Amino acid sequence: MIEISASAPGKFVILGEHAVVYGKPAIALAIDRRFHMTVKGDDEFRINGEVADLRTNPHMKYILGRNGMTSVSVQMDSRIPTGSGLGSSAALSVAFSAAVRALGDRSVSEREVAEEAFEAEYFSQGRGSPMDTSASAHGHGIALNVSGSESDRLWDISKNEHTWHVSKIEIPAMTFVVGYTGIRAATGPLVEKVRKYKDSNRFAFDIINEIGQITLEGMDALRADDVVKLGELMTKDHKLLSILGVSSNELNKLVNASLPYAYGAKLTGAGGGGSIVVLTDQPDKVCDAIASRGGMPFVVKTGVDGMKVSVKRE
């Protein structure tokens, strides 16, 4: 009997969510909250010991089918809140892809797993980018569609008319606080909401372009270790995302409460609920401010490793 253990980190987005779906730049960092699982062969599909329906687990259904399998037994344990904007779905897909590929004695490279997990996310949600799965597979920090040296290029992933150039980035020492609203928000409907807005309104198209531009400015600020400028751009990005209609009263309350003690703050992920991320050198005060508005704060460590896989033979 072969048992595969795999894990993958969550992530947050510094700049660029939603715009990245349309090939614009984005920056994401892996965090020290992980999705853990063990996978072994089984004659029925099981999750945590219970028979499960693959139709309600489309990410896993896609990955199993792509690897010529129909059933496995999965034990899962996640430290990433579901629907939090912290990449729980991508971390699940990355860990499951890595485990299933290892179980089938297939290559388990970061690039192959990131691409397969992205396709699973796309299959489930109908739209998206490889940002989350690339950040989870590689870990540390990644940028999409920004200029840099060829030695930093990790991989390219294409889908329909868009191509994303994924690069690794150096991350200066910074402190981030996440504030979780406790509201789960599905990514697919929010991405579709932005698509409809963009297709029907030139103003929304211009906002997406502006998000792309400030993401490039944010990359320059990161390279210069300029936390003041980076924070300003994060707050500006939040305002643009709010105009696109993907923020919420709960997210705005947490952002506004954090800003007096922060360089910048913004929603992270699809929006609608989920979380904000705050760049600060006063994490205790930010945590208190978030908690005072009903949010659940926690300091996150960045620069963490990406996916990990190990094989146990009994």
Image (cartoon, rainbow, N blue to C red):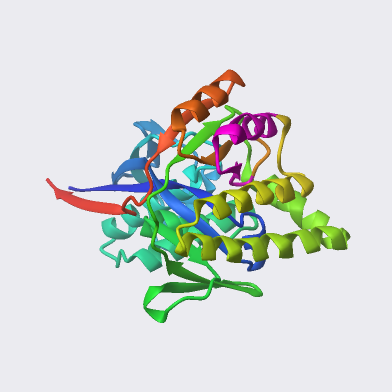
Magenta-span inclusion, residue 127: no
Q: Residue at x 68, y 38 (%)?
A: 272
Front-lying residue, 312 or 253: 253
Question: Magenta includes 262?
Answer: yes
Q: Position of residue 220 (x, y in %)?
A: 53, 66
- Which of 299 and 86 lies nearest the eye of the viewer? 299
User: Quick check: can you spot residue 36?
Assistant: yes
Can you say which quadrant of the picture contains the C terminus? Answer: top left
Q: Count every numbered label the image shows and give the total.
A: 0
Residue ID at (19%, 52%): 311
Between residue 19 and residue 80, name the one nearer to us. 19
Position of residue 64 in the picture relative to residue 192 (left or right)? left
At 63% across and 29% down in the image, what residue appears? 257
Farthest residue in the left direction? 314
Left or right of 244 in this view: 155: left
What residue lies at 39% left-to-right and 55% top-to-bottom? Answer: 172
Outermost residue toward the bottom in this view: 150
- As displayed, is residue 42 above or below residue 145? above
Q: Which residues are magenta?
A: 250-270
| Quadrant housing residue 65 | bottom left
The reply, left or right, for residue 213 in relation to residue 9 is right
